[in-house]
Amino acid sequence: MLPDELTDLEQEVPEREHPVRAEEDLLAARHAVRATAVAVGFSIVDQTKIVTAASELVRNAYIHGGGGTMTITLARDGRGRVGLELSVRDEGPGIADVEQAMADGFSTGAGLGHGLGGTKRLVDEFTIDTAPGRGTTVTIVRWKP
């Protein structure tokens, strides 16, 4: 990507925060991620992957973390690659056992148990910062091929 194209993209895709406090915020967050992925030029397959990952994370923040915030940022790696970085933060109870929460089949509810582990498989980078009593922040990056 040329420097001028990147500057235009940065103007088109400014960092944005989206509240995750009510059920309708989940849909709004998914729409915001899809619109940003389109603006960045992701294929339909990559749009679907990043939207699916975002959907899982904002749902977790809402249901398990009592709400939170999703931040969408244009990611750059210094080698000319661009992508999307999503950070979903809540101030809920935190995750006591991250390894267990990442395991396929683990569910705290009626879900299939593909949540965090499945989300990690949909993206290129995945980090989780959590501790009991201080909430959880999950940051993901999907690079544009």
Image (tube, grey):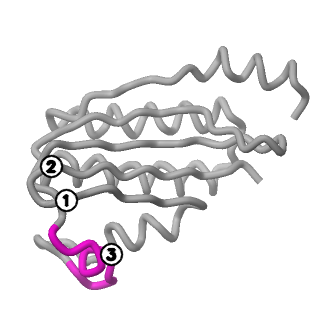
Front in this rendered view, residue 42 or 5 = 5
Residue 30, percent across and down?
39, 40
Mark 2 is on which residue type? Answer: Arg
Residue at image mark 2: 134
At x 44%, y 59%, the residue is 127
Secondary structure of the residue carrying numbered label 1? loop
Residue 19, percent across and down?
26, 28
Relative placement, left or right, of 86 versus 141 is left
Q: CA distance from mark 2 to mark 1?
A: 6 Å
Q: Which residues are magenta?
A: 96-106
The residue positioned farthest toward the right in the image shown: 2
Relative placement, left or right, of 114 versus 121 is left
Front in this rendered view, residue 24 or 139 = 139
User: Would you call the spot at circle 2 few (<14 residues within 10 Å), some (14-19), or many (20 or more)?
Assistant: some
Which quadrant holds the N terminus? top right
98 lies above or below 29: below
At x 43%, y 50%, the residue is 139
Task: Name the mark on residue 102.
Answer: 3
Secondary structure of the residue carrying numbered label 2? loop
Proximity of marks 2 and 1: CB atoms separated by less than 8 Å: yes
Which quadrant holds the C terminus? bottom right
Mark 3 is on which residue type? Answer: Met
Residue at image mark 1: 131
Q: Please name which of the two marks, 2 or 3, marks the residue nearer to the observer.
A: 2
Residue 65, percent across and down?
14, 49
Q: Going from the N terminus, do you reach mark 1 or mark 3 first? A: 3
At x 11%, y 48%, the residue is 92
